[in-house]
Amino acid sequence: MLLAKVWYFLSTGGQAFVLPYFNVYFDQLGFSKDAIGVLSALRPWLSAPCAVLLCALADRWTLARKHRMWASAAWGGLSVVAGSLVAQRGLGAGPAVLVFMWRALIIGLGLGTIGNFLFLHVEELGATTSLMGLMLFFNCVTEVPAFHFQSVILERLPVPLVFNGSMLLLALRLAGYGFLPLLHSPWPVLALELLHGCTFASSWGAGIVHCKRLAPPHLNASMQGLFSSLYGGVGSGLGALLGGVLMQQLGGQALFFICSLVVLVGWLVGYLVELLLVQRGRQVQA
């Protein structure tokens, strides 16, 4: 187990030297923002099929999957999985599951926008690569503790409360990036990066716990695969694709304001549908 944690730490830490700076490099080469968006969307979308197989194998042989915190300590945010074939494995698509997956998609879209275009946004405001490195460090200052204590948090707080709170804070975080140009300095972005633990780690942890509650025991990994594919695959890819078009046409400030609104509306839709489901359940019981 220790060897697996060390390998996970080092391999993901190595990615921190490359992956976050891809889009900055593409921008320096003269790629348009929408072209960068297409390239960024292809990464999670093309990675998805491999993870479907891994999720199926995990269900079949009950492989351990508890090393996520160690990747965060090196560089948080490795979650590209796909579950488009999960329906063939017997998972139901009930209303509660659909609402849950809708939220995963919206959170993935918001985080995908941040992951792919925040560096380009702050670069236009005068940020150096040293500041970008500090941004990743500030991400993990809150992300690592959030992963470490997620079991304690989720024992005391309802999963829906954590999920809803994460979505609202994500909308606030995105809006904060939109206000950065008004501050005439990119450095205040570091304060916003401290929200990463509450927006990414908390929502991810709550999502994995909820997967266990929704899925039959023998399909736990498959449900996690479906959740992860929407969160870190489809959602992240949509954030990259749409974010590239919006940044090219309207600029970074408008991109983050619009994405904030999308996440807020997405949260409201999920919340209202969830309330409707609760009311229907009470009527049926009565």
Image (spheres, rainbow, N blue to C red):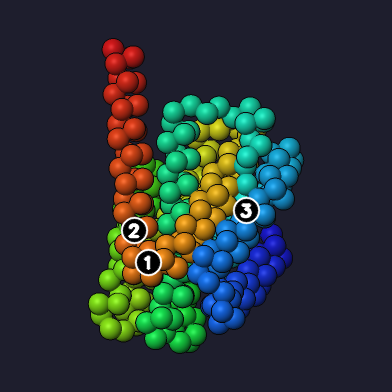
Label 3: which residue? 45
N-term-proximal mark, 2 vs 3: 3
Secondary structure under the numbered disc 1 in the rendered image = helix
Residue bearing mark 1: 250
Residue 117 appearing in the image: yes
Report the residue at 29% width, 16% height from top.
283
Front tag of 3 and 1: 1
Task: Label 3: state its secondary structure.
Answer: helix
* First along the sequence among labels 3 and 1: 3
The residue at the far left in this view is 182
Quadrant into which the C terminus falls: top left
Disc 2 secondary structure class = helix
Amino acid type of the residue tagged 2 in the rendering: Ile
Q: Nearer the viewer, residue 60 or 240?
A: 240
Mark 1, other Cα within 10 Å: few <14 / some 14–19 / many ≥20? few
| Residue under numbered circle 2 | 258
- The three-letter code of the residue at mark 3 reads Trp
- Could you say which is closer to the camera, residue 82 or residue 179? 179
